[in-house]
Image: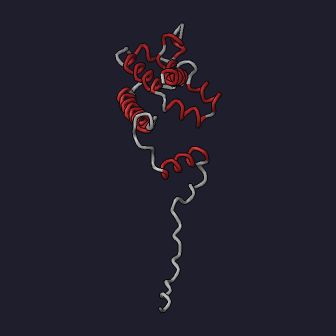
Amino acid sequence: AQLSLIAVLVASAVASGVAPTLRQLQASLGRPLARLVSWTSFSRWLCEALFAVDTAPLSTAYRMPPAVYRKPRSESIIAALVTFQYDASSATLDAAILLLLGVAFRGIAYLALLLANRDERGLPPLSPFTQLWTWTWTTNRHQPPPSTRRRRRRRQPRTPPPPS
């Protein structure tokens, strides 16, 4: 569990849009996959919110075009916004997305706790239908699961007992 958490944290840090930037991430992964990875990364929204909160109280001198500065990469907010593809006025939206991601990840963790190691905890196994559905969904998501209903036998008409 700890190793998987470290893997998730490293992947989230890579997808934060700082190093590599979101443009570099899109160039290496492709646009749809890069968007999915960066939008589900809590680090991306945290970095954007911190950037927006940090730059909000600065004077308009920092919002001049990058050509005005000697070191535009370190002194211009506009250059940083273009480089990182962040929005300077999105701290509230970023906080809401962080809250939603936190709730979603807590829900996933809760489901994992409910479904993992049921036999070792003395709980009954999942129903056969649930096991069949999970196995079918994880192995081949493009085909519907096979029917799990039992076929009814046709009853033979009762014949009257022989006369005695």
> How far across and how far down the image is residue 160, in percent?
48, 88
Q: In this view, does 123 lie above or below 143?
A: above
Q: Which residue is rendered at x = 52% and y = 16% of the image?
A: 66
Q: Is residue 78 above or below residue 140?
A: above
Furthest toward the bottom, the residue is: 163
134 lies left or right of 26:
left
32 lies left or right of 162:
right
> Residue 146: which quarter of the image?
bottom right
- Taking depth in this image into account, of 161 and 146 the one nearest to the observer is 161
**Is residue 148 visible to us here?**
yes
Q: Which residue is rendered at x = 48% and y = 87% of the image?
A: 161
> How far across and how far down the image is residue 159, in percent?
50, 86
> How far across and how far down the image is residue 141, in percent?
58, 48
Furthest toward the top, the residue is: 70
Q: How many marks?
A: 0
Furthest toward the front, the residue is: 164
**Is residue 16 visible to us here?**
no
Q: Which residue is rendered at x = 40% and y = 17% of the image?
A: 55
- Taking depth in this image into account, of 68 and 14 the one nearest to the observer is 14
Colour approach in the figure: secondary structure
> How far across and how far down the image is residue 150, in percent?
52, 63
Q: Is residue 18 above or below residue 138?
A: above
Q: Which residue is rendered at x = 37% and y = 26% of the image?
A: 91
